[in-house]
Image (tube, helix red, strand yellow):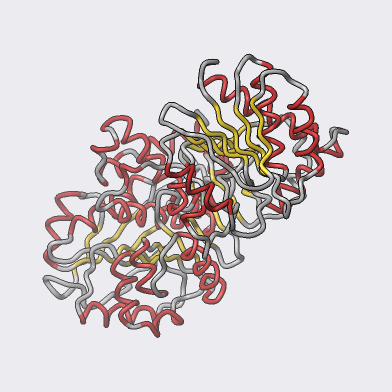
Amino acid sequence: MKIFTTEGIRHICTKAIERDDMSMLDLMERAAESVTYELMSRWRITQRFVFFAGPGDNGGDALAVARLMRQQGYYPEVYLFNIKSSQMSDCCAANRDRLLELDGIEFIEVTGTFAPPELGPDDVVIDGLFGTGLSNPLKGGYTSLVQYINNSDAFVVSLDMPSGLFGEWNVGTDSRNIIRADLTLTYQFNRLAFFFAENAQYLGEVKVLDMEISLDGVGGTPTDFYLIEKEDVQQVLRRPDKFCNKYDNGAVLLVAGSYGMMGAAVLAARGAMRSGAGIVTVHTPLCGYEVLQTAIPEVIVEPDSDRLITKSIPLNHQYSVVALGPGMGTNAETVDAIDQFIKTFRRPCLLDADALNCIAMRQQLIRFIPHGSVLTPHASEFDRLFGVHHTDEERLKKAIDVSKLYEITIVLKGHYTMTVRPDGKVYINSSGNEGMATAGSGDVLTGVIASLIAQGNAPDWSVVMGVYLHGLAGDIAAREHGTWGVMASDIAENLGRAINVVMSGK
């Protein structure tokens, strides 16, 4: 599913208006109808609603909703802000006039000083001040109003977007001047800003409302952002040939583990095997030999010369893919081994966890990473490599830049894991749950991605599919154990079930 910018959504709506032979006011009426239905399904007719409408089209939406709710027997209180310096949109003015034709409306048009209504925990505030049409951060009296609403105990519903929040990028926006909604009712499409962790405090529950408009403009509207869902994975996941053998399903080399961290190697290997790799070889310190042979006897173990750490990374066979990092540690001799490997191995590889931490200790190694390689950092690992960042948005912008610069794919792990490709495309994952924020989860993901690449799936899609299947396996595990009870081993054990779900389409 495409995720469009504010400009892209505006283009699609313009096309829909042309295609359906309607006006902008008609489109707003459809939006208002969908919002009204949602509000009526949640609150009784006795509920107190206080509407705050701005002078633009978002305010027009709010006024239309207030009118429709009054027609259904509700008694909304409406404040329309039409300060002298503001320019009221035609649609907002039209909806104001329609609203004033009704009896029983408590309506105040604010043109100067404003005495705000008393708000309490039993009240519902409808935020229709500013939506995605906002072009500059809020200022003046609007900031005081936003802070007043935020400091009340009322339940806040934002239309389109919480006022003060932009649809894409919000670096530099003062968090005090953004509505903190309990429920955001947006129209037709998700916005990119919804997928950044730092914005969750403003959004509350998010629900996308269908305006039943023509979507003919979707195909011709460009975007670099995509939400990956089951149907996307189903279309590209390679189905095994019934006559295949283990060599057809690829050979994975995992370089993983160290004394006290052998669990990471076990989890990565299990992730690779459970997602269909034909042969998995693990290069690990000698201390891990019996651990691996006992925990997962299906893998081949090639012990390092050192008992406790990895000192070398030999390539004794031809491997479909090499993945390095889980539990390796950052001993000086391990850093040397990573250094030697990165400078001499010229095929794409998969770098995770301590492989990334070792590279961060020798920053010059970044430019030696083979083109086409995949890096799978969590936030702290990303910051060690590319500098300190304070938000998911900042990391994504940096990842887009460095992915293009070094021609590598970067997987920004998080609640909405984002896969950033060198061509600037960003794939946002829709599967997974908070229970997956547990030790070893990333190690399983390394094995899954390596396995899918080894099996002959397209390398760029292998990463995207691996992230989705990993999240889906976590969702299946959470249904059995609850989010509190999910362990990384549960994710690995449910990978086969996740693949079956995708393959079957159920």
Query: Number of labelled discs?
Result: 0
Q: Is residue 294 above or below residue 358?
A: above
Residue 456 on image: x %, y %: 50, 55
State the residue at coordinates (41%, 36%).
153
> What residue is drawn where x is 35% and y is 40%?
474
Q: Horizontal and vertical percent for residue 107?
A: 66, 30
Q: Nearer the viewer, residue 223 or 111?
A: 111
Q: Is residue 10 left or right of residue 4?
A: right
Instruction: Write down the quadrant of residue 458 in the picture.
Output: bottom right
Q: Quadrant of the N terminus?
A: top right
Work out whether residue 384 or residue 152 is closer to the camera in this orientation and state it. Answer: 152
Q: Position of residue 70 (x, y in %)?
A: 66, 20
Instruction: Name the residue furthest bottom.
Output: 364
Q: 136 or 358, which lies in front?
A: 136
In depth, the one of 86 and 283 nearer the eye is: 86
Q: What percent of the width, then of the height, locates residue 362?
A: 33, 83
Query: On screen, 436 above or below 399?
Result: above
Residue ID at (53%, 66%): 397
